[in-house]
Amino acid sequence: MRYAIISDIHSNLQALQEVLSLIDRLAVDRIICLGDIVGYGGDPALCIELVRQKCFQVILGNHDAAAVGLTSVAYFNPVAREAALWTGRVLTPREKSYLSGLPLKDDFGEFEIVHSTPDDPALWRYLFTEEEAGPLFDCFSRQLLFYGHTHFPMVFESSLKEVLFHEPEDFTLDSQIRYIVNVGSVGQPRDGDPRAAFALFDSGRNEVTFHRQPYDIAAAQRRILENGLPQILAARLAYGS
Ligand code: ZN
């Protein structure tokens, strides 16, 4: 089975469309979405529609939860809060009820998925370091966990004695090692590369590969500005930061 794992679309329709068309060409069996379909960008409704059509499973992100009032925006920075409140105003009751019904995590047998961290997903904690990753390996049971939330693709691997950070380079699973993999962000990359990010997991080959896809950034920026969202949200897309 070939899985495409996408995350953190953030209402960026242009990035999502390009990623989905590349995924089409990569002969993927199932597309899995790790949440944050909405927030920041100008096309929440169309992104929800596409994700509903194309994805085999979708889980809840903190920006999805914020847009429908499931989590407080009090801890959001002012720009994120403004975008979340705008998103909440423009979504229909049907779109909101779809987001409200998304689970916080899932288990596919071959791997597990969560938006933030597997200990308590609704706390929306960030995982960046080996120190943070260590205890989290006790919070899921499969060999492989995919997550998003930070918008930085990266890999943590846990062997008998140590947890190590790795750059997001393609790898084959070693049966003695467990992995936590961040797939990066489709719609608002923050690792300095403005191209949309996602990952593929081929369960037959036991292989994880990382992918980047250019898209029409100017068009996504226009949609942010046309909707009166903060300019910084448009500007940052050009830098991938
Ligand atoms: Zn996000």
Image (spheres, grey):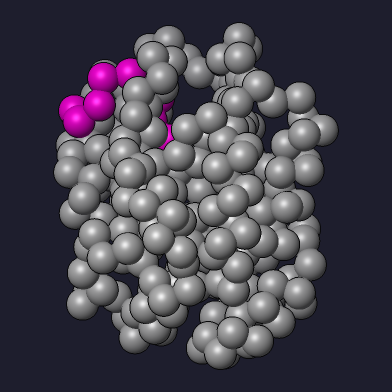
Percent of width and height locating residue 13? 66, 61
Q: Is residue 31 left or right of residue 33?
A: right
Q: Quadrant of residue 15?
A: bottom right
Please tell me whether residue 69 is drawn above or below residue 132 in the rendered image: below
Percent of width and height locating residue 177? 38, 19
For the record, the magenta segment spans 138-150
Q: Quadrant of residue 28?
A: top right
Percent of width and height locating residue 83? 44, 78
Q: Is residue 57 left or right of residue 43?
A: left
Q: Quadrant of residue 114?
A: top left
Along the viewing direction, whichever of 176 and 95 lies nearer the viewer: 95
Which residue is depicted at the point 79% across and 67% down?
216
Along the viewing direction, whichever of 163 and 226 lies nearer the viewer: 226
Q: Is residue 42 left or right of residue 123?
A: right
Percent of width and height locating residue 152? 49, 55
Asked whether 141 falls inside the magenta stretch, the response is yes
Which residue is depicted at the point 35% across and 23% down?
107
Q: Which image quarter is the C terminus in?
A: bottom right
Please tell me whether residue 68 is drawn above or below residue 20 in the rendered image: below
Asked whether 114 falls inside the magenta stretch, the response is no
Which residue is depicted at the point 78% across and 41% down?
22
**Does residue 169 show up?**
no
Q: Which residue occupies the extreme front position in the image?
A: 93
Q: Which image quarter is the N terminus in?
A: top right
Q: How many marks?
A: 0
Please tell me whether residue 79 is drawn above or below residue 169 in the rendered image: below
**Does residue 145 show up?**
yes
Which residue is depicted at the point 57% across and 45% down?
51
